Amino acid sequence: ISEICDSVGVTATAIRQRLVRLQGQGFVSRVMVRSGRGRPHFVYQVSESGLKQLGENYSDLALILWQEMQSIEEPVLRDRVVRRVRESMVQRYGRTDRSRPLTDRLRQLQASLVDRGFDIEIDDSGSLPILRENSCPYQELASSDEGICGLEQEVFGEVLGTKVTLTKCCRDGHHCCEFQPAR
């Protein structure tokens, strides 16, 4: 709420009233986030219904295309199509400079994803940094087929030039997806 207040220049009360109204209409959802010690905080995000109202409902098309790809009966052809999709995603996000430290490569990937509308942050408080997607960009698709989560994990690994492990996933009830690269 404070971030919205700062960017819009209205009071916290006005923001809360508008968010409650948008929640009532089903356009915004409120999610409790626990991170470390202390009290949890709440994050507001545009709901699926809200995204549809914004005219950015690509999930239907993505779901249909993914299902059609997975239904290709010939394994060699299906694998080739999935590989080409993975390669296209890697090209789109851009390979990182492997000579740079892992944290720099993560920041480069983060910038590329943020430019494409992803809500991404890097948590480097632990022994290994974590790339955190605060909202799943493939929620509906992932709920019907976990293969998209594996594809995204592979894409991030190729972009970063290291093995990446999906340690938390929205599909499993977590509030975010977390990807942890190996050193």
Image (cartoon, grey):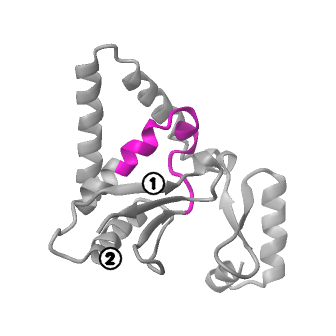
Point out residue 170 in the picture as x, y percentages from the top left corner. Answer: 59, 51
Apparent side of residue 36 relative to residue 113 in the rendered image (left or right): right
The residue closer to the viewer here, 128 or 76, is: 128
CA–CA distance between discs 2 and 1? 17 Å
At horizontal 34% and vertical 74% (from top left) the residue drawn is 107
The residue closer to the viewer here, 48 or 157, is: 157
Q: Are marks 2 and 1 in contact (CB under 8 Å)?
A: no
Residue type at the position of mark 1: Leu
Point out residue 61 in the picture as x, y percentages from the top left corner. Answer: 48, 32
Give the structural element (helix, strand or loop) at label 2.
Answer: helix
Point out residue 82 in the picture as x, y percentages from the top left corner. Answer: 30, 33
- In the rendered image, residue 141 lying in the magenta stretch gets the answer yes
Give the structural element (helix, strand or loop) at label 1.
Answer: strand
At horizontal 70% and vertical 65% (from top left) the residue drawn is 44
Residue type at the position of mark 2: Thr
Between discs 2 and 1, the one toward the N terminus: 2
Disc 1 target residue: 166
- In the rendered image, residue 139 lying in the magenta stretch gets the answer yes
**On the image, which quarter does residue 139 sit in?**
top right
The residue sitting at the left extreme is: 99
Instruction: Kindly report the secondary structure that dominates the magenta region of the rendered protein.
Output: helix
Span shown in magenta: 134-153
Count up the numbered dots.
2
At horizontal 45% and vertical 44% (from top left) the residue drawn is 149
Disc 2 target residue: 103
Marks 2 and 1: which is nearer the front? 1
> Split into 4 quadrants, where in the image is the C terminus?
bottom left
User: Callout 2 environment at 10 Å: few (<14), some (14 to 19), or many (20+)?
Assistant: some
> Split into 4 quadrants, where in the image is the N terminus?
bottom right
Apparent side of residue 141 relative to residue 12 in the rendered image (left or right): left
Point out residue 176 in the picture as x, y percentages from the top left corner. Answer: 58, 59
